[in-house]
Image (spheres, rainbow, N blue to C red):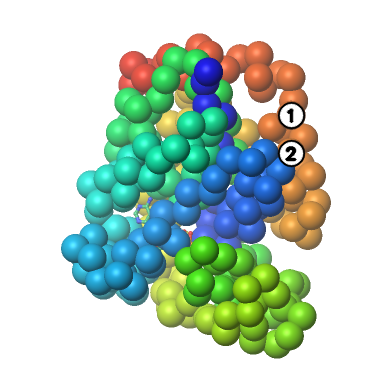
Amino acid sequence: MGRNVLILLGYPGAGKGTQAKEVMRRLCIPQISTGDMLREEIKRKSAYGKAAQELMAAGRFVDDEIVDAIVAGRIRRDDCRKGFILDGYPRTVAQAETFSRGMRTDDRLWVIEISADPEHVMSRLLGRLMCPNSDCTQIYNVHSRAPKVEGFCDKCGSALVHRPDDVMEKIQERFVHYRAKTDPLVEYYKNTGRFRQIDGRPAAAEVTRQLMALIDSEDLEGDMAQPVAKLRKGYIA
Ligand code: ADP
């Protein structure tokens, strides 16, 4: 049986992580966040973590080979056999091409961009707090999604942290890289016919509603097999 594969695209702060967690709960397929996995590699001081640390701290992209390998390993795990949600991957056309070679013809693919302009997401990122517990990684925001007890995770009680790359200068750097490397990816997926866009500006619950409506839509399911075949062949219109 084919897998349900959801790729979420969007600027840093557009809400990919928040939405991925909600979709994961509803569809019972895991969220695969390359940002979370890389932070975990850094914590473990693995070879990948060492290679990624400086690049991430500077707001730059980690090398494709590292991210491709981490994702490929994660997808092979048993909990992904029915599908998975990719949050933060692919982020370059080269990553998308590598990923597409592992797709199966009966996989069902959705590529959805949560759109949000950089000015709007800047304040979200500056106010973002995250749970550092790798089994939890819940996301909060001091403006819109404050934890019940200030500074502590509602779910697991860990002390929340402000990500070191969520500072003005690093955020601007991340936007520059997104524009240069991920915008072309949007064109890539538009050409496969798999691309949809939703508005990331409303409150999180409304964005989830839009996202689920799109995933549930018959129309999207109907035209699935062929574009996956196109992706496997590396086809671009
Ligand atoms: P955001 O999307 O808000 O910037 P993430 O937690 O998804 O945050 O990613 C944090 C950082 O991890 C990125 O700035 C980048 O350095 C690195 N990273 C994550 N995913 C990728 C990827 N697919 N390719 C290259 N680098 C990545």
| Label 1 close to label 2 by CB (< 8 Å) | yes
**Left or right for 224, reference 167:** right
**Left or right for 69, reference 223:** left
Q: CA distance from mark 1 to mark 2?
A: 6 Å
Point out residue 120 in the picture as x, y percentages from the top left corner. Answer: 65, 65
Residue that label 1 marks: 216
Q: Quadrant of residue 43?
A: bottom left
Asked whether 150 or 183 is in front, the reply is 150
For badge 1, the amino acid type reads Asp
Residue that label 2 marks: 212
Which quadrant holds the C terminus?
top left
Q: Quadrant of ligand 1?
A: bottom left
Asked whether 67 or 155 is in front, the reply is 155
Location of residue 236 with respect to 140 vertically, above or below:
above
Asked whether 151 or 89 is in front, the reply is 151
Does the image show residue 154? yes
The 10 Å Cα crowd at callout 1, few under 14, some 14 to 19, many 20 or more, is few
Residue at image position (47%, 19%) is 228
